[in-house]
Amino acid sequence: MEKRRVAILGSTGSIGRQALDVIAQHRELFDVELLTANNSSELLIRQALEFDVNNVVICNEEKYGEVAGALQPEGIKVFAGMDSVCDLVTADNIDIVLTAMVGFSGLRPTMAAIGAGKPIALANKETLVAGGPAVTALAREKNVPLLPVDSEHSAIFQCLMAAAGNRITRIHLTASGGPFRTWTREQMSRATSADALKHPQWNMGAKITVDSATMMNKGFEMIEAKWLFDMKPEDIRIVIHPQSIIHSMIEFADGAVLAQMGHPDMREPIQFALSFPERLSLNNRKLDFAQLGSLSFEEPDYDRFPCLGLAFDAIGRGGVVPCAMNAANEVAVAAFLQDRIAFDAIPEIVSRTMDMAPRISSPSVDDILETNEESLGAAVRLLPEYEL
Ligand code: MG
């Protein structure tokens, strides 16, 4: 593999840190050109020095002085604000862009990078949930590969490499079930943010861990799979698989199913997206099937996890409704993490905000940006009704 020059958007988050861990093991294959972070200035400074990057963006402009003071004497250029991210990702010295920001904020820089023809290692699923039609249309137009980093989508993508062009009839999207898999509705109504943050299998950031607890994450992933693999939502089956060993599966017309497996470790899909189509060594735990003993599967419970049904409803209504769903979810999850609302208020706020979304059949990026703003506001206005 020829050396690749990498931009990491969101380098201080869980995915960004694990990506740098992967790169640290293959220094001869990757140069880190650009790192961006929202707020975590201290970690950003340490990363920039360790990987000797050329450019750094701190999105929070109030922290510019601190970051510039530490890095400019070392010859590292420092910028502030989201406009700088959108500008710098298009630079000639970047071969691949890892989009690992949290939430809707990933949409603009992802569109900018696709517009400049950069291959995308896509870790920011909200970009496809909110902007799927616009993002995939631009990627097709620019002939830009969207390389999935989400473990399920990486699994499907890897299985598709073995499909040799044969059409797939179904996707089996596996879900761990999250920390509340065996909880009753009653128990879940009293769940705290600390309960929701105890994910049984995956080590991830706070927002996605709460999304896993509500299973909104799996709803988002169904929408992500629809856009990435051009599948009908009804052909995407969600199956609970508590051990998280099978990362997802594809099925052909003859009933044959291909699965991709491994211990849950995000570094594997991150590394494959960065090195695609080659595979590199990784110091992870390898599977021992006899030691695993058995793998189990269950039907998802749409009553206890209403966010799953909301996601199918949102993609069925189409247009900007998934964008409104995502915006309301961002507001509700943030409020839940601050212990301001109950766990079961999250789907209610999401559902009511979705109902307020305008009907737009083929939304432009501007429609999506506008719906996001309006839906954030609408969800915030609903919060007082649910305040604990
Ligand atoms: Mg996932």
Image: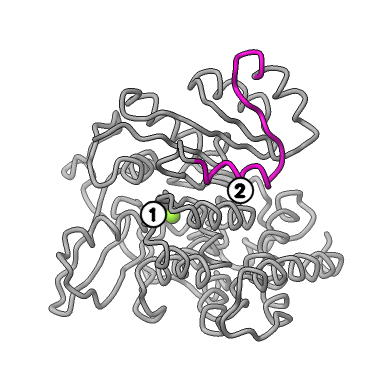
Q: Quadrant of ligand 1?
A: bottom left
Furthest residue toward front? 92
The quadrant in which residue 48 appears is top right
Q: Quadrant of the N terminus?
A: top left
Q: For this view, does 127 lie left or right of residue 263?
A: right
Residue 340, located in which quarter of the rendered image?
Answer: bottom right
Name the amino acid type tagged 1.
Pro
The front one of 313 and 8 is 8
Residue 345 in magenta? Answer: no
Mark 2 vs mark 1: give the one in front. 2
Q: Is residue 177 above or below residue 51?
A: below
Q: On the image, numbered disc 1 is attached to which residue? A: 148
Give whichever of 327, 76 is nearer the camera. Answer: 76
Relative image position of residue 158 (x, y in whole percent): 25, 55
Q: Is mark 2 within 8 Å of ligand 1?
A: no
* In this rendering, position of residue 36 left or right of residue 95: right
Q: Is residue 80 magenta?
A: yes
**At 37% from the left edge and 53% from the top edge, which residue is drawn?**
147
Return the residue at label 2: 86
Query: Looking at numbered disc 2 in the image, what kind of residue is underneath it?
Result: Cys
Q: Is residue 69 left or right of residue 87?
A: right
Please tell me how crowded label 1 is: few (under 14), some (14-19), or many (20+) other residues with Cα within 10 Å. Answer: many
Viewer-proximal residue, 220 or 358?
358
Residue nearer the viewer, 8 or 168: 8
List x then y, in percent, for residue 167: 21, 75
Q: CA distance from mark 2 to mark 1?
A: 20 Å
Boundaries of the magenta span: 72-91
